[in-house]
Amino acid sequence: MNDMTFAGLGVPAPLVGALSAAGLTHPFPIQVQTLPDTLAGRDVLGRGKTGSGKTLAFSIPLVARLAQTRQAGTQRRPNRPAGLVLAPTRELATQITATVQPLADAYGLKVTTIFGGVSQSRQESALKAGVDIVVACPGRLEDLMRQKLITLDGVEVTVIDEADHMADLGFLPGVTRILAATPAGGQRLLFSATLDNGVDKLVKRFL
């Protein structure tokens, strides 16, 4: 039985409460391995497959970091998120948001999901109203960047999930442009089952 706890790994009490309410009391191995580093603000490369608990492994430090910033008095600003998660597909983006949302709710942080194939007007409205965390597919995100509807110069934490899948779909050039638009001093968390197809170049340049 795993006797490690989220609190023991340094997860803040409001998040431990949110996790416990969802029936999550014992961390998965990928969370045990990465949380001490991610919560300390370090860049991390995680090698986790779907189902390994990796979404929670990056959602916890993402929310914890932004909660600290908000508590320090930094205000939410229109069209300027502080946290960014990139995912290859609409389905994965939606799943990630479902994991992040209850954690964000513990601190009153706003989350929005951005993907193509639907009207962008609702996404525009959410961005204008001000969001803390954007979970996005690269294509629609770049569209919104070109239209000056979102700016990434305030992003403190960037997560790239399933980078190997992004590479397979030909998204790495877009991911590279998006990462280049985030501050160089920000925290970056990259999750990938493999380092093939140019994922290694992404790691070398941005982590």
Image (tube, helix red, strand yellow):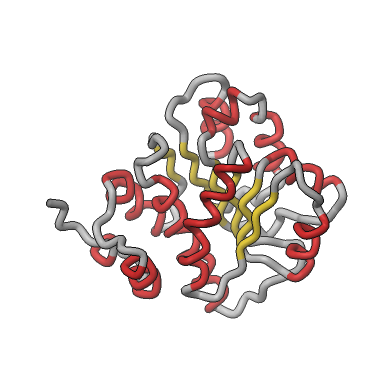
Q: Is residue 110 above or below residue 197?
A: below
- In which image quadrant can residue 36 be found? bottom left
- Residue 16: x and y in percent read 33, 69
- Residue 194: x and y in percent read 44, 25
Farthest top residue?
A: 197
Farthest left residue?
A: 1
Q: Residue at x 50, y 59 (%)?
A: 100
Q: Residue at x 66, y 24 (%)?
A: 170
The residue closer to the viewer here, 67 or 141, is: 141
Q: Residue at x 35, y 41 (%)?
A: 52
Q: Residue at x 59, y 58 (%)?
A: 83
Q: Is residue 169 above or below residue 1?
A: above
Count of numbered circles on the image: 0
Farthest right residue?
A: 147
**In the image: residue 73, left or right of residue 127:** left
Q: Is residue 78 above or below residue 140?
A: below
**In the image: residue 207, left or right of residue 75:** left
**In the image: residue 24, left or right of residue 84:** left
- In which image quadrant can residue 123 be found? bottom right
- Residue 135: x and y in percent read 61, 52
- Residue 173: x and y in percent read 69, 29
